[in-house]
Image (tube, rainbow, N blue to C red):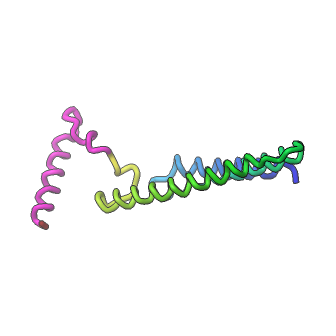
Amino acid sequence: MHLAYPAVLSAVLFCTGLYGVLARRNAILVLMSVELMLNAVNLNLVAFDVWLSKTAEETLHSGQALTLFTIAIAAAEIGIGLAIVLAVHRNRGTADIDKLRDTAERHDPDCPDHEALTAERSDEAQKAEATA
């Protein structure tokens, strides 16, 4: 098999993952797109390792070893990322990336919606006190 086939497939998978990261709003779909990009890199590593092992006398399979490390790091990344997304979803009630803003952004007094945001926070505080 030629090296071009897995390389083209890897490029298509990577571009699909990149589109998913840039276009998606849901944090879980963004994590899945990052996983797709990592798998595209793994496919590329294995394909080039096989191609280089055919030309070299000594086969070290360093591409396959690096792929195993990448899989382990990807598993840890998805575990930690999913835990963070679930914690944010429990606290904020959404996993939408556009709605998740840093709290420091909401305290800007120069913001034209500062009064509306302050009123919104006071309403949320009153609701929290009523439910407690």
When the figure is inspected, residue 121 is found, relative to residue 105, above or below; the finding is below
Q: In the drawing, does residue 132 fall left or right of residue 65?
A: left
Q: Is 103 a magenta residue? A: yes
Position in image of residue 39 (x %, y %): 64, 54
Could you tell me which quadrant the C terminus lies in?
bottom left
Give the camera-side residue of 124 and 2.
2
Name which residue lies at 19% across and 34% down: 109
Q: Residue furthest bottom?
A: 131
Name which residue lies at 10% across and 61% down: 129
Chief SS of the magenta region:
helix
Position in image of residue 70 (x %, y %): 61, 50
| Number of on-image labels | 0
Name which residue lies at 58% across and 55% down: 72
Could you tell me which quadrant the N terminus lies in?
bottom right
Q: In the drawing, does residue 39 fall left or right of residue 117?
A: right
Name which residue lies at 48% across and 59% down: 79
Looking at the rendering, the stretch of residues picked out in magenta corresponds to: 102-130
Q: Residue furthest top?
A: 110
Q: In the drawing, does residue 128 fall left or right of residue 23?
A: left
Give the camera-side residue of 85 and 23.
85
Q: Is 28 a magenta residue? A: no
Position in image of residue 130 (x %, y %): 10, 65
Position in image of residue 103 (x %, y %): 26, 44
Give the camera-side residue of 83 and 20.
83
Give the camera-side residue of 53 and 48.
53
